[in-house]
């Protein structure tokens, strides 16, 4: 099918965009990551995807001109994988490699036509590379067979040049004949150039990492070597061997190289040398006459030449001068040795030696490769063949540089250590004196610190128990004694009895804290002196002239020496600060005695201040209690006055209304009877007078006599219903006020609730602006309750009023209500028992209002707390209700509210 010109333009545009996208993606990956393996693998994958070929691989040359496939991407296993396989140098002839390098040639092979096209690149004057003319020729038969053996029908190869050397190749293989476009050739070329950039970046990274690794090794070894008193030569040697990846190592130190012969880490000044070893070592039994390897004349002869700063031995068996020591290594795998002499300021200190074993290297070849027979043409079999060879470790320039630096560090450290030990010996006496003076200063500082801590504790808390515990613990540590305790006298014993209230002791002596001590001779002989502020110092209780009765008290506690200081409370002897030495006699120093005296004075001050604090705290508590009682009394007084006035008002109004209402209600029956009688006479008159007077008939029509006769009985019945209603309201007012029942009486709780509802009836009815409030009664069969009925009714009134307020202000926000316009108050009662033992009744009053916010639920029973506007609430209703239920009736009043879902008040009152 022939493509139009526009279609060719679109295809060219798409290919160019694909190439740009490919190059941009690879450039971005190189900038983001410096991991060469990852970059090459992803580059091969994206290039193969862009070209649409079966395989793209990246081939790297080794130093011997052989090579290895280090990155590969294959399309659905259409070609076998070559990743990791090595190819001999003869597979890519020398002339081809030179041509790749000299002309930057790009090679295109078509197996079907058996032609090879080559496109050289030349450098322009401005440094850019441009493609020359393509020339083609017949491809060699062996090359065709080689590609066919790989299953390849089309091949494109472009070189990777790095630092003017042929680093590798970018190869594209296809299993079918395929034409290669100019854009694809340029894309492969640019990929090769981008790979060169990635190699350069990776090389810089590797160099930086090697430098950082080297610095880290030197720093770690230097840290181990420059600890002076704890110079860690063995650890430093092990770290050095590990840094080189060695199999073993030795550090030989000559201790007789200076006048101040000093063995590192040893006190024997007669030693001549020291040897530190690490891991694998030569077998010295094979070298008669030598104790250590470094004593061999070969060592000395080699380093007598001032030009030899190191000795890098790649293979000891290929070094003729080492024939006399080769026997020591025959039982090991050691083949390479790096020897660094340790010198500092023209002073020789020894040798640092690193050993490396021979190692086996296994190579996967693409087809068998015989290195001893030059192949006439490349192999035609790619069956994997594994070749293993024993190799030696060559010491490179980086190894020698690192070894030289570490040798300097070892030599410097040894020299510094020797100088340090010399200075130590010279200053031994001076340091001893300084140490002694320092110890005294430290002891004085510790004493002052403890004294400061005591004063700080007094200022911070005035908790005498905390102060005593701190003092006893730290004072025992400062004085290095066996026991420090605080002894308190019994105030009623006149200094004859007392006990230890705090102590700090060592593990080997008995505790005195649980002992109640009775010592009459102490009270008679010593107490008065302590009360005068004197301190008692005893170096040895058996040689201090103490009375036998006093020694008998001290002996069970294993006391041998002691210091006792008084603790005063005002002018009275409160107790003693006791310091006991139990394991031996002790001569107490003047500084120690003075320090103990100061501590005792501070403890006395602490007692006085703690006593003042206790008195102040007690008075504060009393004032707070008095203030709280006044607040409660004020609240109760207000409520009592309020209830008294309200009760009198309600009772008076009810009484005044009751009398006329009773008069009217009582006479309605008579009025009804009289009217019946009058009506009966009218009916009788109508029956007897067949022709009534004309004037009477006119009057009857004028007043509508028939209607009056019919409506008058109904009017009387309505009046009777109205008077009954008034009488019920009056009865509810009297029941609610209970003005005549101030004492405890048995009442029906339901009557009190109904009375409150009757009074609040006008607030429950529907209004023009809102719906009415529905009352749901779930009454149980309750026993009579003995209570202050008027006060209980007031509780019902307060809680019901608050519920009505909540519904009037916020309406129904109940989250579970189906009808959002309904407003309900549910009153439930039941019989129960408080704490499962005291008979009680429970009244629950719940509304479906907006609830109480969580942050104020804990404050609703506080006096004067209200959420209503100024002038609409006093904040006393729930507070007084709480006092009435909880304090007066020993019941329970609690509130449970879920914001947005209503509020429920729980009232529980004992029945008796």
Image (cartoon, helix red, strand yellow):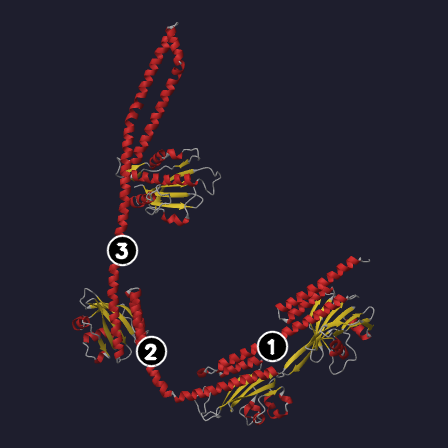
Q: Position of residue 656 (x, y in %)?
A: 27, 29
Q: Is residue 840 left or right of residue 43?
A: left
Instruction: Confirm or deny contact between disc 3 and disc 1 (CB under 8 A).
Output: no
Q: Position of residue 699 (x, y in %)?
A: 38, 10
Instruction: Confirm or deny contact between disc 2 and disc 3 (CB under 8 A).
Output: no
Pointer 3 residue = 621
Circle 2 Cα neighbour tier, 10 Å, few/some/many (<14 / 14–19 / ≥20): few
The residue most toward the left is 524
Q: CA distance from mark 1 to mark 2?
A: 53 Å
Q: Position of residue 882 (x, y in %)?
A: 33, 45
Residue at screen point 27% across, 41% down = 640
Between disc 3 and disc 1, whose residue precedes? 1
Instruction: Confirm or deny contact between disc 1 and disc 2 (CB under 8 A).
Output: no
Pointer 1 residue = 207
Q: CA distance from mark 3 to mark 1?
A: 78 Å
Quadrant position of residue 399: bottom right
Residue 508 in view in this figure = no
Pointer 2 residue = 442
Q: Secondary structure at mark 2?
A: helix
The residue most toward the front is 125
| The C terminus lies in quadrant | top left
Note whether 443 is above or below 288 in the view shown.
above
């Amino acid at each position: 099918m022939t493509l139009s010109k526009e279609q060719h333009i679109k295809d060219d545009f798409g290919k160019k965009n694909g190439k740009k996208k490919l190059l941009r993606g690879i450039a971005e990956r190189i900038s983001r990551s410096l991991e060469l393996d990852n970059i090459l693998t992803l580059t091969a994958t994206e290039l193969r995807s862009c070209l649409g070929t079966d395989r793209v691989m990246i081939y790297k040359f080794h130093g011997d001109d052989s090579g290895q496939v280090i990155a590969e991407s294959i399309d659905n296993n259409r070609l076998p994988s070559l990743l990791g396989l090595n190819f001999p140098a003869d597979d890519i002839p020398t002339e081809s490699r030179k041509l790749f390098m000299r002309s930057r040639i790009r090679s295109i092979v078509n197996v079907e036509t058996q032609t090879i096209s080559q496109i050289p690149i030349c450098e322009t004057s401005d440094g850019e590379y441009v493609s020359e003319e393509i020339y083609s020729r017949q491809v060699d038969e062996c090359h065709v067979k080689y590609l066919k053996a790989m299953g390849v029908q089309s091949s494109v190869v472009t070189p990777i040049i790095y630092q003017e050397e042929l680093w590798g190749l970018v190869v594209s293989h296809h299993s079918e004949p395929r034409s290669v476009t100019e854009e694809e050739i340029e894309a492969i070329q640019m990929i090769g150039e981008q790979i060169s950039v990635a190699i350069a970046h990776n090389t810089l990274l590797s160099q930086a990492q090697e430098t950082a690794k080297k610095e880290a090794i030197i720093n770690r070894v230097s840290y181990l070597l420059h600890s002076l008193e704890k110079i860690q030569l063995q650890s430093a040697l092990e770290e050095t061997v590990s840094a080189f990846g060695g199999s073993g190592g030795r550090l030989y130190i000559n201790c007789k190289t200076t006048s101040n012969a000093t063995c590192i880490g040893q006190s024997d000044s007669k030693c001549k040398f020291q040897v530190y070893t690490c891991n694998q070592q030569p077998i010295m039994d094979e070298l008669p006459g030598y104790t250590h390897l470094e004593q061999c004349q070969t060592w000395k002869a080699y380093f007598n030449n001032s030009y030899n700063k190191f000795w890098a031995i790649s293979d000891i068996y290929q070094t003729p001068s080492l024939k006399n020591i080769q026997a020591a290594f025959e039982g090991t795998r050691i083949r390479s040795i790096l020897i660094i002499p340790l010198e500092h300021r023209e002073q020789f200190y020894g040798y640092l030696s690193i050993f490396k074993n021979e190692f086996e290297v296994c190579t996967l070849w693409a087809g068998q490769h015989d290195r001893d027979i030059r192949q006439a043409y490349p192999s035609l079999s790619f069956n994997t063949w594994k070749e293993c060879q024993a190799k030696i470790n060559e010491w490179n320039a980086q190894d020698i540089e690192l070894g030289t630096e570490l040798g300097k560090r070892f030599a410097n450290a040894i020299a510094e250590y020797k100088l340090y030990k010399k200075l130590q010996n010279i200053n031994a006496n001076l340091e001893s004196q300084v140490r002694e003076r320092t110890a005294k200063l430290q002891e004085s500082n510790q004493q002052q610190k403890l004294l400061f801590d005591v004063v700080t504790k007094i200022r911070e808390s005035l908790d005498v128990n905390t102060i005593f515990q701190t003092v006893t613990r730290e004072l025992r540590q400062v004085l290095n004694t066996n026991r420090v305790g605080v002894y308190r006298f019994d105030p009623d014993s006149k200094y004859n009895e007392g006990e230890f209230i705090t102590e700090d002791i060592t593990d080997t002596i008995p505790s005195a804290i649980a002992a109640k001590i009775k010592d009459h001779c102490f009270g008679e002989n010593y107490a008065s002196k302590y009360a005068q502020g004197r301190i008692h110092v005893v170096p040895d209780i058996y040689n201090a002239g103490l009375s036998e009765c006093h020694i008998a008290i001290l002996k069970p506690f294993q006391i041998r020496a002691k210091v006792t200081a008084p603790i005063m409370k005002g002018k009275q002897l409160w107790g003693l600060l006791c310091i006991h030495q139990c394991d031996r006699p002790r001569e107490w120093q003047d500084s120690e005695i003075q320090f103990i005296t100061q501590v005792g004075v501070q403890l006395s001050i602490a007692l006085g201040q703690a006593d003042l604090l206790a008195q102040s705290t007690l008075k504060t508590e009393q004032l707070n209690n008095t203030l709280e009682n006044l607040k409660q009394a004020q609240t109760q007084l207000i409520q009592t006055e309020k209830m008294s006035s309200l009760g009198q008002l309600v009772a008076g109004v009810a009484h005044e209304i009751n009398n006329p209402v009773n008069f009217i209600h009582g006479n309605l029956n008579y009025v009804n009877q009289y009217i019946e009688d009058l009506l009966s006479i009218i009916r009788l008159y109508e029956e007897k007078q067949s022709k009534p007077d004309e004037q009477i008939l006119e009057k009857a029509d004028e007043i509508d006599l028939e209607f009056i006769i019919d409506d008058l009985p109904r009017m009387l019945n309505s009046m009777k219903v109205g008077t009954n209603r008034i009488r019920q309201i009056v009865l509810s007012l009297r029941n609610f006020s209970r003005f005549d029942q101030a004492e405890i009486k048995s009442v029906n709780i339901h009557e009190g609730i109904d009375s409150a509802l009757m009074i609040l009836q006008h607030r429950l009815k529907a209004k023009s602006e809102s719906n009415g409030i529905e009352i749901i009664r779930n009454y149980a069969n309750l026993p009579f309750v003995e209570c202050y009925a008027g006060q209980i009714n007031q509780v019902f009134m307060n809680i019901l009023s608050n519920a009505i307020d909540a519904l009037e202000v916020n309406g129904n926000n109940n989250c579970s209500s189906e009808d959002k316009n309904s407003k309900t108050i549910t009153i439930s009662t039941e019989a129960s028992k408080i704490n499962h033992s005291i008979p009680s009744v429970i009244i629950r009053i719940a509304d479906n209002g907006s609830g109480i916010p969580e942050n104020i639920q804990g404050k609703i029973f506080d006096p004067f707390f209200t959420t209503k506007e100024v002038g609409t609430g006093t904040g006393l209703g729930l507070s007084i209700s709480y006092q009435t239920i909880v304090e007066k009736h020993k019941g329970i009043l609690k509130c449970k509210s879920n914001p947005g879902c209503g509020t429920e008040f729980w009232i529980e009152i004992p029945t008796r």
